[in-house]
Image (cartoon, grey):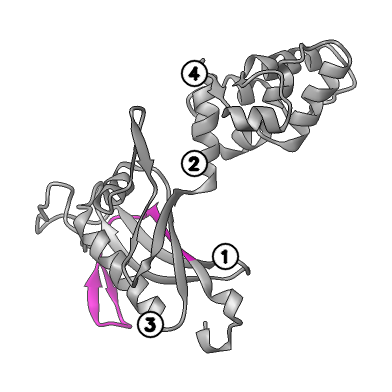
């Protein structure tokens, strides 16, 4: 990847962090002349036993915001947990190096695992039921800019789905309700369940992408992104509107759509 060959708009990027499971063991790497396999980050409690072996790889990768490109820029080997202070320093180091090359790093993207949430908190990122969410911090390379933090899209979809399938509702802001002239502020999964039920009675399916795993996922189904994606698909919204128009669903379902 040569930054000098990029157009100005192609230099805007996100820094993504992903942890993947690896096979534990020691391996000699001829390229660097070293034995790899031990954790390179301390555990969550700050310790790093001499006999410990890495079980995961923490990968740092850049991705374009206005164009499709990706580039792995670093990694660390970790055990089942890691101390958040070390990745924070690594994050700042990577962002600083990238900005010095002419890239603009605007956002950090990760899943919502415990280690990443601890890392977010080191940057002052938090959200609570009784407090105002904080989703950005002062950019380490420019005090006039903000560095944003966001979960990756699959985790956002699964979290929203889990919120609804646990029996809770989502309430839209008043300005959204008024702007789109919605009948209510409440988003309710019961309307989608009714859609699945009605579709099951018909040989001609209007919602073939939906099934019981989408509206009532079991343990392993909750881990699969495809069921959450199907639930929030544009076709689901169109199907709900069709049932409202045909009188099989009340108008309140339009908000869910």
Q: Position of residue 13 (x, y in %)?
A: 50, 68
- Distance from the alpha carbon under mark 4 to that under mark 2: 16 Å
* Cβ atoms at labels 2 and 1 below 8 Å apart: no
Mark 2: few/some/many CA within 10 Å (<14, 14-19, 20+):
some
SS of the residue under disc 2: helix
Q: Secondary structure at mark 1?
A: loop
Q: Secondary structure at mark 3?
A: helix
Residue 32 lies in the magenta stretch = yes
Residue at 55% across / 37% down in the picture? 157
- Which label is found at residue 100? 3
> Viewed as shown, does residue 46 lie left or right of 180?
left
Q: CA distance from mark 1 to mark 3?
A: 18 Å
> Residues under labels 2 and 1: Cα distance?
19 Å
For the residues labelled 1 and 4, the Cα–Cα distance comes to 34 Å
Q: Magenta part of the protein: which range?
A: 14-37
Q: Is residue 73 above or below residue 114?
A: below
Residue at the (42%, 47%) spot, across then down: 111
Q: Earlier in the sequence, mark 2 or mark 3?
A: 3
Q: Callout 4 environment at 10 Å: few (<14), some (14 to 19), or many (20+)? A: few
Residue to which mark 1 is pinned: 65
Q: Earlier in the sequence, mark 2 or mark 1?
A: 1
Mark in the foreground, 3 or 4 = 3
Q: Residues within 10 Å of mark 3 (few under 14, many from 20)?
A: few
In the displayed orientation, state which residue is furthest to the bottom.
Answer: 4
Q: Mark 3 near mark 4, Cβ–Cβ under 8 Å?
A: no
Residue 26 percent location from the top left of the image: 24, 64
Residue 33 higher or lower than 78, as above or below: below
The picture places residue 101, in percent across and down from the top left corner, at: 42, 84
């Amino acid at each position: 990847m040569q930054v000098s060959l990029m157009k100005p708009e192609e230099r805007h990027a996100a820094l993504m962090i992903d942890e993947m499971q690896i096979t534990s063991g020691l391996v000699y790497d001829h390229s660097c002349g070293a034995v790899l396999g031990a954790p390179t980050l301390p555990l969550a409690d700050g310790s790093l036993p001499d006999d410990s072996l890495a079980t995961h790889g923490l990968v740092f990768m850049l991705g374009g915001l206005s164009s499709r490109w990706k580039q792995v820029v670093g990694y660390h080997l970790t055990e089942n947990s890691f101390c958040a202070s070390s990745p924070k320093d690594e994050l700042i180091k990577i962002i600083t190096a990238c900005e010095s090359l002419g890239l603009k790093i605007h956002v950090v993207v990760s899943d919502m695992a415990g280690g990443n949430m601890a890392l977010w908190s080191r940057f002052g990122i938090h959200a609570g039921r009784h407090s105002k969410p904080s989703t950005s911090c002062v950019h380490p390379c420019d005090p006039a800019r903000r560095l944003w933090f966001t979960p990756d899209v699959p985790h956002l979809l699964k979290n929203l789905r889990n919120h609804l399938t646990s029996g809770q509702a989502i309430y839209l802001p008043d300005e959204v309700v008024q702007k789109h002239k919605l009948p209510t502020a409440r988003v309710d999964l019961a309307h989608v369940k009714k859609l699945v039920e009605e579709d099951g009675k018909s040989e001609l399916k209007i919602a073939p992408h939906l099934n019981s795993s989408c509206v009532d996922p079991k343990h392993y189904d909750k881990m699969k992104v495809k069921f959450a994606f199907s639930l929030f698909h544009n076709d689901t919204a169109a199907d709900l509107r069709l049932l409202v128009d045909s009188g099989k669903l009340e108008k309140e379902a339009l908000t869910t759509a």
